[in-house]
Amino acid sequence: EINHAGAGGLWAELVSNRGFEAGGPNTPSNIDPWSIIGNETYINVETDRTSIFERNKVALRLEVLCDSTCPADGVGVYNPGFWGMNIEQGKKYKVVFYARSTGPLNLTVSLTGSNGVGNLASTVITGSASDFLNWTKVEAVLEAKATNGNSRLQLTTTTKGVVWLDQVSAMPLDTYKVGLYLEFDYFYQRR
């Protein structure tokens, strides 16, 4: 794909390497440009082949080792998109991903500045262990409180346990035919 002319270009996807398969179908896979929030005493991040999708088997596994000792903002991963995400005040962004967990889920989804400072928009996704025992589709709409042309998407938690993530997507709601692209992508993943 030349200069990201599809995803991040003509297609309004803000997340780069949303399926954690930049390194191909084998594990460990290259998760770039995703980066870890926290250090190895708080979190262990790796890929495995447990995805719900038959054609894209790689998923991201986050083993959170801290609970009351976690940093106040939590640990997790972030994605800077394609050279930074352009987030605009007052606009809404739909975040969709699949999650699975070994216990209760308490995951903060946020749009921040490029260094993780400045909360532009956020929501907390919660659920019991039984809610996320199997892969579950999660959808959230975030409304930006400020503008930042070099933002990132963060997924963080302070809850000890193991969380798997896959097919993380973020798109502006006012994009032409965004629903069509999401449906096409869903069927592409399933075939």
Image (tube, rainbow, N blue to C red):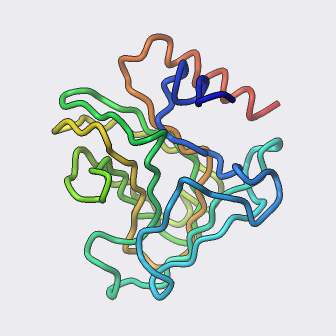
Coordinates of residue 34 in the picture (x, y in percent): 53, 56
Q: Please indicate whether residue 147 sits to the left or right of residue 58 in the image.
A: left
Q: Please indicate whether residue 111 sits to the left or right of residue 185 in the image.
A: left
Q: Please indicate whether residue 65 sits to the left or right of residue 18 in the image.
A: left
Depth order, front residue of 183/174: 174
Name of the residue lying farthest toward the top: 176
From the viewer's perspective, is residue 24 above or below residue 100?
A: above
Coordinates of residue 191 in the picture (x, y in percent): 82, 30
| Residue at 40% in and 63% down | 156
- Quadrant hosting residue 2: top right
From the viewer's perspective, is residue 183 above or below residue 59?
A: above
In this rendering, the count of numbered labels is 0
| Residue at 32% in and 47% down | 111
Depth order, front residue of 53/2: 2
Coordinates of residue 117 in the picture (x, y in percent): 23, 58
| Residue at 44% in and 30% down | 171
| Residue at 37% in and 48% down | 152
From the viewer's perspective, is residue 111 above or below residue 187?
A: below
Name of the residue lying farthest toward the front: 3
Image quarter where the N terminus lies is top right
Coordinates of residue 16 in the picture (x, y in percent): 55, 42
